[in-house]
Image (spheres, rainbow, N blue to C red):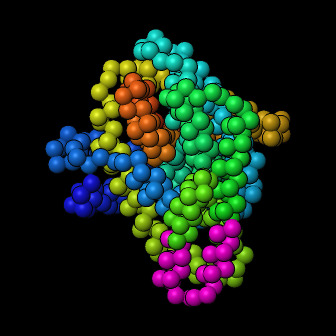
Amino acid sequence: MSAAVAMILLCIGYLVFTIDKKQENVPVPAVLVLIGIGLSFIPYFTGSSVPETLIYDVFLPGLLFVSAYQFSAKALRKNAGIIGLLSTVGLALTILLMGLTIYWIGGWFFSISLMGAFVAAAILAPTDPASVVSILKKSAPDKSIADIVDGESMINDGTSIVLFTVLSGMYLQSQTFSVLSVLGDFLYVSAGGVILGVGFGWLLSKAVHVTHHKDYQVMLSIILAYGTFQLAEGFGFSGVLATVSAGIMLSWEFSHTNKEDHYREALAGFWSVVEPSLLSLLFLLIGIEATQYLSWNNWLLAAFILFASIAVRFLIISGTFQLLAGRKHEAIWKKSLLISWSGIRGSMSVFLLLQLGVMSSGNGADDLISLSFSVVILSLIIQSLGIHPLSKLVGSN
């Protein structure tokens, strides 16, 4: 991607976000993806590819850090049970049920193995609410819904990478499955990332007191966001969980200082510009990149899998609420429905798709990648556009 293309895409993003400020029920990612798809037919933009390393090393750390340090420590403590279960056990169950569904129905359309179906499910499992969280905060009948959706998406990104790595290795390299090995890898990668992130988040929260100059405080936050990510990856830990943990720890420490507003104002001045800039580039590039994978005829299958995934999420989420709250919890189905619908596929799914494309070069995974990309695009458009009306509908009953 050239500098000129990047500037044009940022200008488009500026226009879309400006319009969105006046129409807060319009989900920015869906609009950007549609524009990106349109741009892909203009020769000037056809060479603007998205390397998977660009998404993982540049876009994700910044976006995850912003979400994490803005996430309320009080909201995390209040919803820790549901967020923890949905992003770990719930995610594993989602991959299991979705894998079986894709294998069963996908076999009617093209040749797909059971392990290939599980890989597709692992790609589609992580959620990316992006700017729809702001819509939920304004229109959802229960304000905790936005916190649950946001918190789940931050943590399940790390879980999904571990499960995808295991399943894709079995799919492409015929590796054997070992429960103990998978659990061991998962604990090492996840716990290591969390511990490292919490430690560095705490250190920076203390270092920020050394200077009252806002520019230097912002510099420290950049080091925390990207440095923690890269350091964790260097040790073989989850960079995603490390960055998320660091951001949450920083937010927690800020909430316990008498200068919380000063520090948050310093960071907001920088990251409130970086976040929409990263989102603009990312989703426009996703739209441009997606076009080459969407030249197939099984859109009916993709739509079926999308709605099946929402149904699976609904069953798991409602069951988790029942487990945690029992019969005392009211209107479980309403919260479960809205949280299920808010589980939009986005940047993490695209990264995993591009990663699979690199890993499977020449191994005949083209149909699997095209199917998954189609589901991601449908999810970004259909689910994003449905968030606001569904929130109003559920809230009115």
| Image quadrant where residue 321 sits | top right
Q: Give the percent coordinates (x, y) of residue 324.
A: 80, 41
| Image quadrant where residue 334 sits | top right
Q: Give the percent coordinates (x, y) of residue 260.
A: 64, 78
> Does residue 160 belong to the magenta stretch?
no
Q: Residue furthest top?
A: 108
| Image quadrant where residue 257 sits | bottom right
In the drawing, does residue 261 fall left or right of residue 37? right
Q: Residue at x 52, y 55 (%)?
A: 134
Q: Quadrant of the C terminus?
A: top right
In the drawing, does residue 317 fall left or right of residue 282? right
- Main secondary structure of the magenta stretch: helix
In the drawing, does residue 136 fall left or right of residue 302? right
Q: Give the percent coordinates (x, y) of residue 90.
A: 68, 36
Is residue 385 visible in the rendered structure shown here?
no
Q: Residue at x 46, y 52 (%)?
A: 56
User: Compared to 239, does 338 lie above or below?
Assistant: above
Q: Residue at x 41, y 68 (%)?
A: 273
Q: How many marks?
A: 0
User: Compared to 262, does 73 lie above or below?
Assistant: above
Q: Residue at x 30, y 60 (%)?
A: 10
- Between 82 and 227, the residue placed more toward the observer is 227
> Does residue 221 belong to the magenta stretch?
yes
Q: Give the percent coordinates (x, y) of residue 130.
A: 49, 51
Q: Residue furthest left?
A: 43
Q: Quadrant of the N terminus?
A: bottom left
User: Compared to 30, does 116 lie above or below?
Assistant: above
User: Compared to 46, does 295 lie above or below?
Assistant: above
Is residue 37 visible in the rendered structure shown here?
yes
Q: Which residues are magenta?
A: 199-222
